[in-house]
Image (cartoon, rainbow, N blue to C red):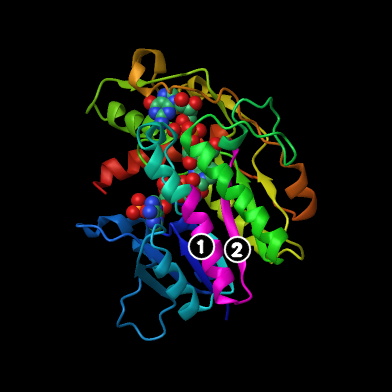
Amino acid sequence: MKTALITGISGQDGSYLTELLLAKGYVVHGIVRRSSMIGNTSRLDAVYQDPHDSGRRLFLHHGDVTDAGLLVNLIRDIRPDEVYNLAAQSHVRVSFDLPDYTANVTALGAIRLLEAVRASGIDTRIYQASTSEMFGTAAPPQHETTVFHPRSPYGVSKLFAHWATVNYRESYGMFAVNGIAFNHESPRRGETFVTRKITRAVARIAAGLEKRVYLGNLDAVRDWGYAPEYAEAMWLMLQHGEPVDYVIATGRAATVRDFADAAFSHAGLDWRDHVEHDDRYERPAEVPELVGDPAKIEREIGWKARVYWDELARIMVDADRNALRSGT
Ligand code: NAP
Ligand code: G4F
């Protein structure tokens, strides 16, 4: 029975990865931030196991990737076979307001974890959640050897974490890999990312609860995939014979406008009647066009996206409408 440690277990990806690993028979440990409310683990409700259950395989530990001692202690005690570093201040727009904090969590958090693994001396495999945001203004399609040009404190922080992962691999021979994931979404996506913001608004507008949604740049192009499939790619990368970095993407992209059109149309609405512009959602520097080239991961690992952005919009609208109807 393998053991995994997941930072960021309460996030969108952490919850799907937990379900995948539990289904594969893993013992899963996750780090969750202490909160004054218990709601920050709600994405894990379906797999939550009471501490008193005998034979449970999911263990949650209070912690934070800004606390080096905690990381050292947990890794020494758990001795995981696999470590997935998904913790981050992951919102690009917010990172312009919180650059110092974002760097502390998203950049330094990664090197703290790498160093904790190195200090423990255990033989473990590490997945670092890298991002297409590091490509910034690089021309599409972006692939593993495209030159990075990040455009936000978040992108800069992730680039530090990315190269720290490469450096620990090269310096210490650790099995540490970067998954350079393009945008991936789901009904569990945070409500302030543009896809979920749109699909939630569609559900509320279709139900007569709201009339409009305010958005920023509609011209941005993104390669949106389906988050559960990206959790599978993360796991596959750690089962591979060699530690190799991969782009994880669908290879197909659309504008924010296209996504809004698909989402509103699915509910029988015209996006032009309901979308208004608000400057506050623009960024000081934008990433104009992200379209990944997934050829390498398809060829070497056999992972391939199955859900593309238009079906994804429909999945998310249906989920938000159902949730509204059932009051969940
Ligand atoms: P998410 O939903 O925002 O989840 C982020 C997770 O990190 C949450 O569990 C959050 O805890 C946790 N976290 C934040 N600050 C922390 C800290 N100081 N210490 C410990 N945990 C902390 O992000 P996601 O969409 O699942 O993405 C997972 C990872 O992949 C992130 O690193 C993200 O940057 C990266 N990524 C995402 C995408 C994408 O399109 N989704 C693409 C490329 C890369 P709370 O629940 O308490 O906030
Ligand atoms: O949904 P977004 O906030 O995602 P963004 O900035 O691409 O970042 C996400 O994907 C990255 C991978 O490339 C991850 F690393 C990162 O953690 C995160 O998951 O914005 C997508 C696009 C942007 O161009 C933004 O300017 O949508 C545009 N947009 C237009 N109106 C908006 C809005 N974005 C948000 N969040 N809210 C708006 O109202």
Q: Residue furthest left?
A: 36
Percent across and percent down for residue 245 are: 70, 51
Task: Say if 16 sits above or below 172 in the image.
Answer: above
In front: label 1 or label 2: 1
- Residue 108 located within the stretch drawn in magenta: yes
**Numbered badge on residue 124:** none
- In percent of width and height, residue 101 lies at 37, 44
User: As rendered, which of 132 and 207 lies closer to the eye?
Assistant: 132
Identify the mark nearer the N-term, 1 or 2: 1
Image vertical order of residue 40 relative to residue 103, above or below: below
Residue nearer the viewer, 246 or 307: 246
- Disc 2 marks a residue whose amino acid type is Ile
In the rendered image, residue 297, in percent from the top left (x then y), is placed at 73, 49
Question: For numbered disc 2, what is the local secondary structure?
Answer: strand
Marks 1 and 2 close (CB-CB < 8 Å): yes
Residue 120 sits above or below residue 328 on the image: below
**Among the 4 quarters of the image, the one containing residue 83:** bottom right
Chain part drawn in magenta: 107-132
The residue that appears at 64% across and 75% down in the rendered structure is 123
Horizontal and vertical percent for residue 63? Answer: 35, 64
Residue topped by disc 1: 113
Q: Is residue 275 something one can see in this rendering? A: no
Residue hosting label 2? 126
- The local crowd at label 2, few if under 14, some if 14 to 19, many if 20 or more residues have their Cα within 10 Å, is many
Which kind of residue does numbered mark 1 sit on?
A: Leu
